[in-house]
Image (spheres, rainbow, N blue to C red):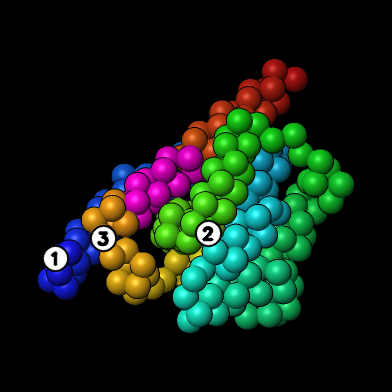
Amino acid sequence: MDRHSISAAHEAALKKISELHAAKARSKHPLWQGLMQGKFSRPQVVEFLKQAGCIPLHNHHYHGYLYINCTDAAWRIRMAEVVYEEGTGRIFSDGVAHPELYLRLSEAFGISRTEMWGTEYGPGALGVRHFFESICSRNFLEGFAALALGAEASGPGVLGKVSIAFQKHYGLTEEQTKFYSVHEEADSDHSSGGADFLRQFATTDTDVALVVNSVRDSLTVLSGLWDDIWQRVQKVGDAAQRR
């Protein structure tokens, strides 16, 4: 492709990615709507937190591969900053690692660390773990597209509202809900630079198609996780009503 066609292809790809996000927006899913509105019982939130832990508690298996596989020195620095933040929290979360923030949030809902680490994941969570470990270790192009332009770009606008809802409806403190308030900002930062990424790494029609397909697959896998957790949350509620 010449420079003009590359630019046009990139603009078309970004438009398609935006459409994919609109079609599978977290804010439209009943699971996330219930969380933002504080509609679930505490046991239902516990079920959500345990299954959703497949992402933050195993993040090093995802972002770590992106740093290793990145062939560009400048972008490798960007990936190093992401890995550093996830592992230390020294950029956005006052020196508390993101998995630790998640464990503290879980403890606020009565989930011990042993229980959280020992969660028996359902098919949705297992699918997410397998997908992101696989695509992030495959190559940087597909991995970054799936994780940053797909998964992380789907959080801002929702996660901050969940943090507020946990404080308002479940009596948690701002500190206890910091995992979600931090990720409202951190995920926005991590998923930025889509146009720069395309210019740097998507230099052929095949590359552009791989980026779009990776984002599509990422959002599809995540949607499957939310569907699975939504069903589990409903079962917890049904079981409570039968008692």
Amino acid type assigned to the residue bearing label 3 in the image: Thr
Q: Which mark is residue 204?
A: 3
Q: Which mark is residue 5?
A: 1
- Compared to residue 177, the image places residue 131 above or below, namely above
Magenta stretch holds residue 214: yes
Indicate the position of residue 192 as horizontal and vertical percent values.
41, 71
* Residue 232 in which image quadrant: top right
Label 2 secondary element:
helix
| Residue labelled with disc 2 | 159
Query: Residue at 32% across / 57% down in the picture?
Result: 207
Determine the CA span between mark 1 and mark 3: 10 Å
- Tag 1 and tag 2, C-beta contact below 8 Å: no
Pair 1/2: label in front? 1
Within-10-Å neighbours for mark 3: few <14, some 14–19, many 20+:
some
Mark 2 residue crowding within 10 angstroms, few (<14) / some (14–19) / many (20+): many
Up/down of 148 relative to 216, above or below: below
Q: The magenta stretch spans which residues?
A: 210-222
Percent across and percent down for residue 205 are 24, 56
Q: Is residue 188 shown to the viewer in this render?
A: yes
Residue 52 visible to the viewer: no
Q: Which residue occupies the foreground of this view, 168 or 159?
A: 159
> Magenta segment: does it hold 138?
no
Question: Secondary structure beneath disc 1?
Answer: helix
Q: Position of residue 211 (x, y in %)?
A: 35, 55
